[in-house]
Amino acid sequence: MSRPGIDRVFERRLSALVNGGEPQILQGGRKGVEKESLRVRPDGVLATTPHPRALGSALTNVHITTDFSESLIELVTPAFTRSWELLQYLLDLHQFVYRHLGDELLWATSMPCAIRRDEDIPIAQFGKSHVGTMKTVYRRGLSLRYGRMMQAISGVHFNYSFPLPFWEVYADIRESRERGQDFISASYFDLLRNYRRYGWIVLYLFGVSPVVCKSFLRGRDAGLADFTNNTAYDPYATSLRMSDVGYRNRNQSGLNVSVNSLDEYVRDLSYAISTVHPPYEALGLKDAQGEYQQVNTNILQIENEYYSFIRPKRVARSGERPTKALRRAGVEYVEVRALDVSAFDPVGVNQNKVRFLEAFLALCLMKESPPIGAAEQATLDQNHVTVARRGREPGLMLTRDGRPAPMQSWAQELLDSMAGICEVLDRGDPTRPYSQALAVQSAKLANVALTPSARLMEELTTSDESFFDLALRMSKAHKDYFVDLYPTNEERLAEFSSQAAESLAKQQSIEASDKGTYEEYVQRYFAN
């Protein structure tokens, strides 16, 4: 791990970037968002109605689909080079969805509420094609292995790729013999390792799930305190979603996937999706009625089952597994998965957050990034859990280079290092949006009350509401915002309607063209 204090290697790389002949070389990175939201009834109870047909086919509509549950809508933007275009597209998607939700709402927070039983959460349906069946069977497997409640948690994923011209300049700065895709992939793995080292700061700055409904806990003793009769919390939590209460799955605690290189990453994931796990084998591939309840009984059914804060990605060809796509053509972009849905933003995310993340990923790329051993990885995992559960605790200490280190000063050091990166990203723009975004985050370090988790606790305290009441009120306010928003982009909304209709036709075509059995399809998928 890099030494406390000045990272000389990073300073040299940044200086070369700042003083190079192409001052705007970092600008124009491609960014996209995937945003999940539970559909709920006006009373806040989970909607169990089917995915609205007017939104198209969840199987084939690339912009409006479902995640684990039929009730869990996922909105997916294309990649944009400017953050305001990204946010505008996401806003337009929300407007379109609300035109077809009737009286239903999109739940405004990551953590679900008012769900009594696992079986009240409907598993997503993707039609009768082999690929659609496999998607549903995969979700049945998730339900069997981890329970449906955990899968009903919503999040925001931020996808990012550096501009292609940047890589040639960066290879020169690194004096690398490698060029082209091999260099790009290796550099993205530098980034992935450093995100594991420093990504806890994202939970402090943007975590907004310090409380949960007790219905989510279902009687579990998660070490949380009572806030109201039906609300539990950690007094200093930032993101219970990203803690051991939420996504951090104990079932996968023994699964170690290396990000020391592309080869090691693919090796470890390939092992996990091809190795039988006796506890899952004991659950059975099929249920008592002979229906498939898992894709297989391996450690992971498919690669996407692996939970991580950040993933290397490559757009796959039809029927191509993610690891095969990475092996074929290398890393194309990264997917940051650690963002809570922001109850304070109608679309769940904002431009300051997107800009900060873009600069933070550049920091993770450019800092020293030695390989991560098993002992260091355990420490890094614990740092994330500590900030998720206790991030606002005064005097909080993390572990750095094997020694206790104050979170506050470490975080300030990271933000100070980002100033030069933000200046490069701001060049040519007198409004300096990246530096402004960095200043907003620095203010949260100086005053913990400005963090989203603290703001949510303050809102709960002053309004004297339960988490359920607050989330329902915000969900209704967001719906009113989208319904009343004027003017609307009717041309884009019409485009969404056309895409929805085309996706329904495409699903029918896939179903009509299926050959062989489902079992043969699965064999081909894993043999591919």
Image (cartoon, rainbow, N blue to C red):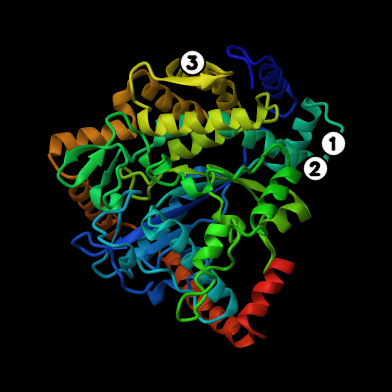
Between 266 and 96, the one lying in front of the other is 266
Q: Residue furthest top?
A: 5
Q: Which residue is mark 2?
A: 182
Element under disc 1: loop
Q: Residue furthest bottom?
A: 512
For the residues marked 1 and 2, what is the alpha-carbon distance in whole angstroms?
A: 7 Å
At 51% across and 71% down in the image, what residue appears?
Answer: 137
For the residues marked 2 and 3, what is the alpha-carbon distance in whole angstroms?
A: 35 Å
Look at the image and tell me in which quarter the C terminus lies.
bottom right
Query: Could you tell whether 434 is left or right of 260 in the image?
Result: left
At 59% across and 66% down in the image, what residue appears?
Answer: 296
**Mark drawn on residue 138:** none
Residue 1 seen in the figure: yes
Callout 2 amino acid:
Asp
Occupied quadrant, residue 323: bottom right
Disc nearer the start of the sequence (3/1): 1
Q: Residue furthest right?
A: 177
Element under disc 2: helix
Q: Which residue is mark 1?
A: 178
Look at the image and tell me in which quarter the N terminus lies.
top right
Q: Which residue is mark 3?
A: 405
Residue 363 seen in the figure: no
At 30% across and 47% down in the image, what residue appears?
Answer: 220
The location of residue 488, given as percent across then percent down, is: 36, 60
Callout 3 amino acid:
Ala
Q: Nearer the viewer, mark 3 or mark 1?
A: 3
The location of residue 67, given as percent across then percent down, is: 46, 62
Q: Do the residues under discs 1 and 2 have CB atoms within 8 angstroms?
A: yes
Occupied quadrant, residue 361: top right
